[in-house]
């Protein structure tokens, strides 16, 4: 038997009481009063000790999908994945999932509700890659709930395969021709000369926007005509790359 008070998500100021008794695990949201949460935990523990609290007879409040997915984002995704992944997952949940599943207790969400949500988003015209992302941000918290023994199985598994939704048609990439590049650079040099070096670097190296913005003079090897790509700049945040790339360039800017 255990009764624990935890802040979920960490740093949110919201306190929960988690109960583990006779193979049953329940959770109850208390609010922002930690002292009250501790008092509730003591009372529950006393009732469990005296045998006065029958968890089978009275079902305790379970975390909503929104609360539990926030816990999943903060405790699992944010510290272990890239910041951009965390923000993309959070945005997908907020825009596409919370309006339909956010307030439902996580142990009461049925497979048919997830199926209907995906079918509705497919009807709205979302691409299959977007549908896969919606599936992932629902499946992640569900799998986390399985690990926490709040639900017995993940209802999302295999759902897209069963729906047999068509994959997106391949988009043919049409890169700029040499003549188009030259015209672009000539126009830039004439009307926006302050941006000419930036676009010249992009065309000569294939580097991404954030990588070019994060360049420093020390990254350029003028003797060997190489640029070391060690950093990136995204959403106002500079980040060091986990892998270092090198780009061979021509430093004759003519």
Image (cartoon, rainbow, N blue to C red):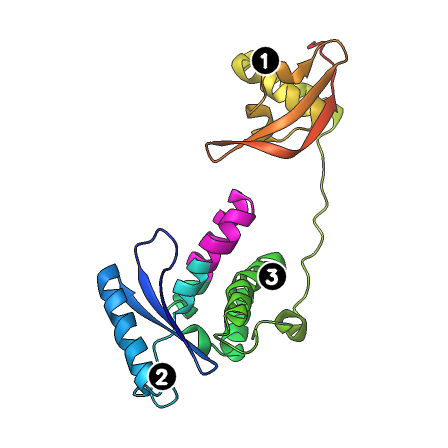
> Which picture quadrant has residue 48?
bottom left
Mark 3 residue element: helix
Badge 3 or badge 2: first in the primary sequence: 2
Q: Residue at x 60, y 61 (%)?
A: 132
From the viewer's perspective, is 57 left or right of 143? left
The question of residue 130 being in magenta is answered with no
From the viewer's perspective, is 205 left or right of 3? right
Residue on which the image places disc 3: 132
Residue extent of the magenta highlight: 72-96
Q: CA distance from mark 3 to mark 2?
A: 34 Å
- For marks 1 and 2, give the one nearer the viewer: 2
Q: Give me the disc on residue 189.
A: 1
Badge 3 or badge 1: first in the primary sequence: 3
> Which picture quadrant has residue 189?
top right
Residue on which the image places disc 2: 59
- For marks 3 and 1, give the one nearer the viewer: 3
Q: Position of residue 84 (x, y in %)?
A: 53, 44
């Amino acid at each position: 038997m255990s009764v624990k008070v935890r802040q979920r998500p960490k740093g949110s100021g919201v306190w929960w009481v988690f109960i583990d008794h006779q193979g049953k695990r329940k959770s109850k949201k208390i609010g922002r009063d930690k002292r009250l949460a501790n008092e509730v935990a003591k009372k529950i523990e006393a009732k469990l000790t005296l045998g006065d609290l029958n968890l089978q007879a009275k079902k305790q409040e379970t975390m909503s999908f929104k609360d539990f997915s926030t816990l999943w984002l903060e405790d699992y995704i944010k510290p272990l994945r890239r910041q951009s992944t965390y923000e993309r997952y959070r945005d997908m949940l907020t825009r596409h999932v919370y309006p339909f599943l956010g307030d439902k207790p996580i142990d009461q969400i049925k497979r048919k509700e997830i199926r209907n949500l995906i079918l509705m988003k497919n009807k709205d015209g979302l691409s299959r890659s977007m549908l896969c992302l919606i599936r992932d941000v629902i499946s992640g918290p569900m799998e986390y709930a399985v690990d926490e023994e709040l639900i017995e199985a993940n209802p999302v598994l295999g759902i897209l395969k069963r729906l047999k939704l068509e994959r997106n048609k391949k988009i043919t990439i049409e890169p700029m021709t040499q003549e188009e590049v030259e015209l672009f650079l000539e126009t830039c040099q004439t009307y926006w000369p302050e941006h000419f070096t930036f676009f010249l670097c992009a065309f000569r190296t294939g580097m991404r926007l954030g990588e070019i913005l994060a360049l420093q003079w020390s990254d350029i090897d003028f003797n060997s005509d190489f640029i070391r790509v060690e950093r990136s700049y995204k959403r106002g945040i500079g980040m060091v790359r986990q892998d270092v790339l090198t780009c061979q360039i021509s430093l004759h800017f003519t």
